[in-house]
Image (cartoon, rainbow, N blue to C red):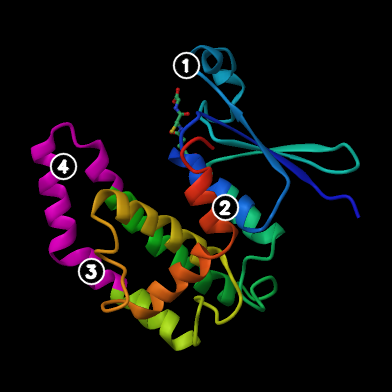
Amino acid sequence: MAENTYELLYWQIPGLADITRLILEAVGASYTNKFVTRETFKEIKEEQRFGHIPKLTVKAPDGSVVHIWESKAIHNYLADIFDLLPEGAHTSAVKRAECFSNVFSLYEYMDRLSMIRVMPTLELRKEVRELAMSDKLPKALQYHEKLVAQSGGPYYYGKKMTLPDLILYALNVRFNIYIGEAVLINEAVTPHLHKLVQTLDAGRAGEYVRDRRDWG
Ligand SMILES: N[C@@H](CCC(=O)N[C@@H](CS)C(=O)NCC(=O)O)C(=O)O
């Protein structure tokens, strides 16, 4: 049966397209990247729903085309389409909300981390990093560690890979870059999150991060 194809419009950097690419790669979807430059973006900015990218274009086998903007809405859409939700979440609002509570909690750490990146001086970047490291991030991760442990692992929902797994994995890539390799998620401190990361590392998600993440 013919399947949808996907095109992701963004700059040639990971940025806000990274998790969408990770999801598409992890599920083995057929997708292409369309890169913009400062010059080409100027011409198409006003065509975008909110004047921003990323934009995901979905082409169905019958020729119909839809566009989706806002990176988190794109993740949500792909989680629905590729069944990256726990059992029962398609019919139970509670199960769905519970799954997204994991996701939103992880997005929050991601936003906190991006503060490190946007600080204008090295001194400020160090200060924000120290603050994040001093208590908040390590403590917060323990809640997630407990959830994955309770599921029996390797994922948030046992043996089924769902959206929170991919967000946690993407977050760990950023931890490795901004905080240091395996400083926050490792076998000694967060053994279940470590196992989750290792499991995704061994498959398509890991391949994407190692081979294609930097250039899309
Ligand atoms: N909330 C939006 C933010 C999108 C956004 O700020 N995109 C930036 C690139 S990272 C952009 O399009 N900048 C160009 C502009 O605003 O002119 C999302 O998550 O998709």
Query: Which amino acid type is shown beneath numbered disc 2?
Result: His
Q: Residue 79: x and y, percent?
A: 63, 59
| Mark 1 or mark 4: whose residue is earlier in sequence | 1
Asked if residue 122 shows in the view, the reply is yes
Up/down of 101 relative to 126, above or below: below
| Mark 2 or mark 1: whose residue is earlier in sequence | 1
On whether residue 125 falls in the magenta region, the answer is yes
Query: Where does label 3 land, which residue?
Result: 138
| Secondary structure type for disc 3 | helix
Instruction: Tell which tag, 2 or 1, sits nearer the viewer.
Output: 1
Q: CA distance from mark 3 to mark 1?
A: 38 Å
| Secondary structure type for disc 2 | helix
| Secondary structure type for disc 1 | helix
Pointers 2 and 4 in contact (CB under 8 A)? Answer: no
Q: CA distance from mark 2 to mark 1?
A: 25 Å
Q: Residue 182: x and y, percent?
A: 29, 63
Query: Where does label 1 land, which residue?
Result: 38
Image-quadrant location for residue 92:
bottom right
**Is ligand 1 less than 8 Å from the beta carbon at label 4?**
no
Q: Badge 4: few (under 14), some or many (20 or more) residues near its Cα, within 10 Å? A: some
Q: Badge 2: few (under 14), some or many (20 or more) residues near its Cα, within 10 Å? A: many
Asked if residue 72 shows in the view, the reply is no
Disc sitting over residue 125 in the figure: 4
**How many dots with numbers?**
4
Query: Where does label 2 land, which residue?
Result: 75
Q: Residue at x 89, y 50 (%)?
A: 2
Query: Which amino acid type is shown beneath numbered disc 4?
Result: Arg
